[in-house]
Image (tube, rainbow, N blue to C red):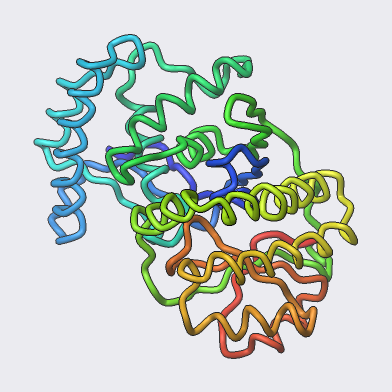
Amino acid sequence: MKGPLFYSKILLFGEYGIIKDSKGLSIPYNFYNGALKSDGNTSSDAIKSNTNLNRFAAYLEQLQTEQPDLVTFDIASLKKDIKNGMYFDSSIPQGYGVGSSGALVAAIYDKYAQNKITVLENLTREKLLQLKNIFGQMESFFHGKSSGLDPLNSYLSIPILINSKDHIEATGIPTQSRTGKGAVFLIDSGIVGETAPMVNIFMENLKEEGFRKMLKNQFVKYTDACVENFLGGDLKSLFSNTKKLSKVVLNHFKPMIPEEFHGIWQKGIDTNDYYLKLCGSGGGGYILGFTEDLEKAKQSLKDYKLEVVYQF
């Protein structure tokens, strides 16, 4: 048995900001994916995944007991499949900010949720919010607190525009140009990032008035502008606002940037060859880059392997 594939995602804009109601834009990233499998695999990865699924099933059983109106699962089938060795086979790197737990949550909901909202329905704003809420509660098992966006993106496999906490919609993004010079890319930091500690640092910082001001007047402002520029295809403004955003992140989110990347982060701002930003919560994993000239960025970052996500 092999379930359908669920893809990784990339939050192009909105990390941390969406906690404070900034706009956000999340796109599927089909390079990585995962699926539920029951094929008798006894590798250490499969056994570890199976053990985790067992704990997750217990959590979901408790969740539906406490909130029966939110979601109900066919727990008996889920437990039976886990007992028979089911695991989540995934190429999505964990702790890299590309939604490894989101894909798993989407796969479990797809297979075991009762009265589920399907991708084929007319997805009204209410249904999208309902799904996001369900996924947020499910994914909290992995992160302590989840917006539910990663699983939502993985489940629907379409770009999602976050206007605010209570206003999300499926959206179209400008068509890629395979020959375009401009690009969005990923750099592998080589370090696994942990979401919870990074979110805790952010929540602590929020207690300071200066940080809250900066967030509202700079971080959220530039994030919102970047989302609008990207969707509107206004590349000149997009790069100008991404540069501002990159500066703000370097100045105010230093703990989320692995130390050895502080220098190349600054170099991008100084040379305009590329601009870096966080991919997910940071602390490791991938770093997201934007460039008007991909060849120039590759030359400037020749010590790193760039994975191109989107070209324009």
- For image coordinates 62% across by 46% down, the residue present is 27
Q: How many marks?
A: 0
Q: Position of residue 135 (x, y in %)?
A: 41, 30
Quarter placement of the C terminus = bottom right
Q: Nearer the viewer, residue 26 or 259?
A: 259
Residue 213, given in percent of the width and then of the height, sits at 64, 50
In this picture, residue 287 sits left or right of residue 45? right
168 versus 237 height, above or below: above
Residue under the image location 40 percent in, 25 percent down: 134
Q: In this view of the protein, which residue sits in the foreground, 24 or 169?
A: 24
- The residue shown at (36%, 37%) is 105
Task: Give the quarter of the image for residue 283.
Answer: bottom left
What residue occupies the far left of the structure in this picture? 83
In the displayed image of the protein, which residue is found farthest to the front? 209
Q: Nearer the viewer, residue 270 or 186?
A: 270
276 relative to 311 in the view: left or right: left
